[in-house]
Amino acid sequence: MEARDILVHACCGPCSTASIERLLEDGWNPVLYFSNSNIFPQEEAERRYEALLQVAHSYQLQVIHERYDHESWLQSIQGHEMEKEGGLRCEKCFAYNLSQAAAKAQALGFSHFTTTLTVSRFKNSKLIFAVGQQLEGFECIDFKKKGGFEKSVQLSKELGIYRQQYCGCEFSMH
Ligand code: SF4
C-alpha cells in the first residue's frame, strides 16, 4: 500500500461523488468499499451499489463489495429500533458499518480509512467522528464542508445516477 491509499466506506453513489473529488484534491488514492447491511430491503442495497459502480467507473476507481447481512445489522441495533433518526440507533449503525470498514482496511493493509457518511446534511459529522475515532486508522474528513453536499447533488445529477429517498433501514422509511 502507498502512504496516501485510503479505504472509503461508501454509503451510496451520490454521497461518493463529492467525497471522491475532495479526496483526490487532497492527494488521496481512494478505494471504495460498499458495506451497508443497514439498507433494507436488499434490492434497495443492490440499487445503491449499482449507482456506486457508475460513479466508480467515471472516476476509474476500484470497488470492494461486502456481503449483505441485514440480520446481523438488526442484532447490532436491537432495542433501539424505534429511536428517532439521528439517535442511538444511528450511532450503533455507524459503529457497525465503520467497524466493518476498519476490519477490511486492516485485512487489506490500508493504514487509513474513512466514510462518505459525512456528506449528508442530515447526518451529524461529530457523532460519526466520535464513533470512527475509536477505530484504528480512521480519518475524520467532513465531506459536507467546502460545499460538499451541494456538489454531491450536482454531480449525481450530471451522472444521472439513482438518488435514494430515505436513509437506508426499514425504520427510516417514511
Ligand atoms: S436511519 Fe440511517 S443511519 Fe440511522 S439506523 Fe437507519 S440506516 Fe442507519
Image (cartoon, helix red, strand yellow):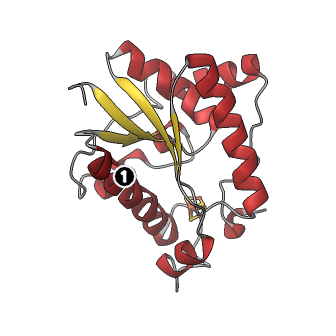
Q: Nearer the viewer, residue 19 or 46?
A: 46
Give the number of marks: 1
The answer as to whether callout 1 falls within 8 Å of ligand 1 is: no
Circle 1 packing at 10 Å, graded few (<14), some (14-19), many (20+), is some
Q: Position of residue 20 (x, y in %)?
A: 48, 24
Residue occupying the point 74% across, 38% down? 163
Mark 1 falls on what kind of element? helix
Report whether residue 150 is seen.
no
Q: Quadrant of residue 48?
A: top right
Q: Position of residue 29 (x, y in %)?
A: 36, 23
Residue occupying the point 48% across, 28% down? 19
Q: Is 46 on the left or on the right of 114, as rendered?
A: right
Residue type at tag 1 = Lys
Q: Is 142 on the left or on the right of 40, as rendered?
A: left
Quadrant the C terminus occupies:
bottom right
Q: Quadrant of residue 2?
A: top left
View extreme (bottom): residue: 79
Report whether residue 108 is seen.
yes
Residue occupying the point 69% across, 28% down? 54
Vertical order, 11 against 145 (above or below): below
Q: Position of residue 88 (x, y in %)?
A: 46, 71
Quadrant the N terminus occupies:
top left
Pointer 1 residue: 104
Query: Which quadrant of the render holds ligand 1?
Result: bottom right
